[in-house]
Amino acid sequence: MPDVPPPARTAPPAPVELRVSKRILWIGSAVYPLHSIARVYTFMLRPRRKEAFLRFLRYAAGTLAVGFIAMLPSLPSLTFGGADSSAAGYVSWVWFLALAAVIYFFVDMMSVLTAQPHYVLAVETSGSSTGLVTSRDPRHLDQLVGQISYAIDHPDTEFRVTVERLTVSPHHYYFGDNVNMYGGNGNVGITR
């Protein structure tokens, strides 16, 4: 199978070399023996926007509830002692911390809401490791799937290409389907 040249790019964010040599797939400095690769595929990695928004609402509501509970012991002092008592300073400190926490949760939510989806090539092994790379050209990744599949069946195949490193938080993106299994813990059924 002929080598696929990398697509023309402008200012690559983080290039990484993907190569097959002597029955080993190298993705940067990560090593995947070709005989232990269980699946090679491409998919669209999408941010978990709905979950990020719901998490923000849950954390903001929890922070406000904790703020009200923390303020309860100082209510008698505020109502009978006046607004210039030391309880007023305590209450303003509690609400300052609550506001800072809500701002932090909002920024965290916005980082997920503004994240872009990525078209990625995933390499899964028979163990638990997965390698992800991306390219600005989805056809390039589809061709790489064919090249890696060909190299698995043909031990003398060697090639080298440049792709982009993908660094994402797994908590902010969907990584495929969840499957509900009998006897498992924490399984949620198939969600898309």
Image: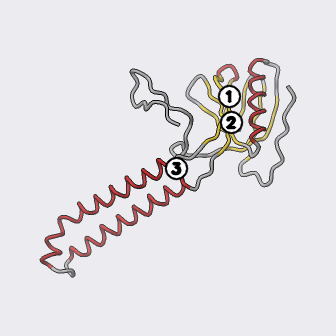
CB of mark 2 within 8 Å of CB of mark 1?
yes
Residue toward you, 10 or 25:
10
In the rendered view, tell whether residue 13 sits above or below residue 31.
below
From the top left corner, tell me how far across and down residue 109 is, in percent. 49, 55
* Image point (13%, 71%), residue name: 76
Q: Amino acid at mark 3?
A: Arg
Q: Amino acid at mark 2?
A: Leu
Counting residues from the N terminus, which is met first, the one under dot 3 or under dot 2? 3
In screen coordinates, is 89 left or right of 27? Answer: left
Label 1: how many Cα within 10 Å (few below 14, some 14–19, many 20+): some
In the rendered view, tell whether residue 49 sits above or below residue 88.
above
Label 2: which secondary element: strand
Counting residues from the N terminus, which is met first, the one under dot 2 or under dot 1? 1
Image quadrant assignment for residue 42? top right
Q: Amino acid at mark 1?
A: Val
Which residue is denoted by mark 3 in the rendering? Answer: 49
From the top left corner, tell me how far across and down residue 7 is, in percent. 82, 44
Q: Which mark is residue 121?
A: 2
| In front: label 3 or label 2 | 3
Label 3: which secondary element: helix
Counting residues from the N terminus, which is met first, the one under dot 3 or under dot 1? 1
From the top left corner, tell me how far across and down residue 91 is, in percent. 26, 70
In the rendered view, tell whether residue 45 sits above or below residue 71.
above
Image quadrant assignment for residue 20? top right
